[in-house]
Amino acid sequence: MTSDITASGLNVSRETFEKLELLERELRRWQAIKNLVGPATLDQIWERHIVDSLQLLELAPEAKTWLDLGSGAGFPGLVLAIAGAERGLKVHLVESNSRKCAFLRHIVRLTGSATTIHEARLETVIPGFVAKVDVVSARALASLVQLLDWTAPMLKAGTIGLFPKGRDAEIELTEARKKWTFEAETLPSATDSSARILRITSIESHS
């Protein structure tokens, strides 16, 4: 576990590491009953979920407020809340699945992270965060076109979009540019050489 974090060049404090270990243990315990993540990823929780989430924190070091859409079992949002606590990061998690929200609340209670959980559909939550958060993220949630449809009002107001994508990231960018004009950085993933992280800013619709 420690080697996964070290190999990725991501350094966390002992307190943060212990809270992430707690997250791992509780996820394994709840998984048997709630089926929170894909069973095939259980043997690689640190690399596939925790370290993969942690790398986003380094891409927005000045962020104080963060909105994570479709948070699921807490990746990346809950991991970011735990790791960002020491710098005062406040994270909002949006998840409509009640059993996943129950898990999120459980971990927030155990770790004391500065996290607000919104058990709702993201379309109803996003309007209330325009011009109110520094970063919006979404992992394995939807196509880039759909993500931009949802988050464009936030991005126009100055929020940074961080969207982890797989090997088809460039294809998704091409499709999105048919509808939107935006600034995009394509960044390497620390956990998968074929994956990319898209950093999106300054968006405008073609219409």
Image (cartoon, rainbow, N blue to C red):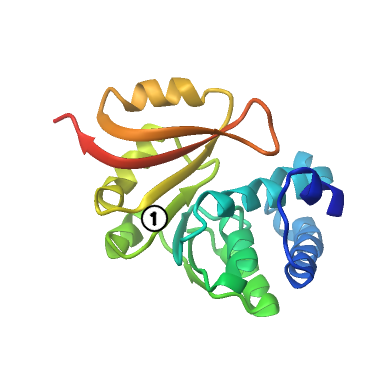
Residue visible at 25% across and 54% down? 157
Element under label 1?
helix
Residue type, mark 1 in image: Leu
Image height check: is 179 above or below 57?
A: above
Residue visible at 26% across and 31% down? 180
Q: Closest to the observer: 91 or 107?
A: 91
Residue visible at 28% across and 42% down? 202
Residue placed under numbered mark 1 in the picture: 122
- Quadrant (top left, top right, bottom left, bottom right) of the C terminus: top left
Q: Quadrant of residue 48?
A: top right
Q: Position of residue 201 (x, y in %)?
A: 34, 42
> In this view of the protein, can residue 1 be seen by the observer?
no
**How dense is the environment of label 1, judged by Cα within 10 Å: few (below 14), some, or many (20 and up)?**
some
> In this view of the protein, can residue 86 be seen by the observer?
yes
Q: Closest to the observer: 204 or 139?
A: 204
Q: Closest to the observer: 24 or 202?
A: 202
Q: Position of residue 171 (x, y in %)?
A: 45, 20
Q: Give the left or right position of residue 118, taking residue 165 as reference.
A: left
